Amino acid sequence: MKARINSPIQKCAVGVNIPKEKADIVSGVMAAFNGSFKLAGSDCGGEKIGFVCGLSGYTESGAKAEVSEELLIFSGLDGKELSKAVTMLREKGCDIPLKAIVTPHNRDWTVSALASELAKEHEYMTSRGKSDSNGKK
């Protein structure tokens, strides 16, 4: 039987278009989980999520695409840690509407595709409580 050794996934968060004040808060929150935070350029939209989050097996594609939204991508946190991190950000007044965690499903997506999908989901979730044009909810 072969032993299988998996290298541990580093806990990190990657931000796109995150202002310095929020970046400092996210950095502090990630430090509480022995993780790191890095900013990616707004032109990273053509890169795969796995690459920007530093996952092994991913290399830079060089594809440039602009991302206009504030986006925060978590990697390596388990469910409890993610919930706690989001709570800590909220408690510190750090509102970043588009947040995701790296999954086996999305790690091959481009940053632009993830941002687009999250923006649609965010719009849907925020419009659910609003009345339609007939005044109905």
Image (cartoon, rainbow, N blue to C red):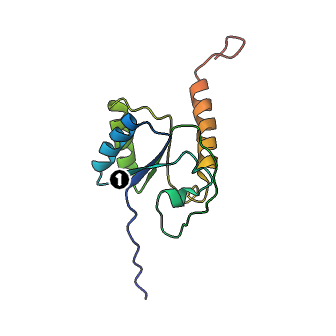
The total of numbered circles placed on residues is 1
Q: Give the quadrant of the N terminus.
A: bottom left
Residue at 39% across / 46% down in the picture? Answer: 82
What is the x, y in percent for residue 91? 33, 31
Is 26 situated above or below 52? Answer: above
Q: Residue at x 33, y 48 (%)?
A: 30
Q: Quadrant of the image for the C terminus?
A: top right
**What amino acid is labelled 1 in the image?**
Ser
In the image, residue 1 above or below residue 82 = below
Q: Position of residue 92 (x, y in %)?
A: 32, 31
Q: Residues within 10 Å of mark 1 (few under 14, many from 20)?
A: some
Between 129 and 31, which is closer to the camera in this rendering? 31
* Residue placed under numbered mark 1 in the picture: 36
Q: Answer left or right for 18 relative to 43.
A: left
Of 3 and 66, the residue lying toward us? 66
- Asked which quadrant contains residue 85, the reply is top left
* Secondary structure at numbered mark 1: strand
Residue at (50, 34) in percent of width and height: 97
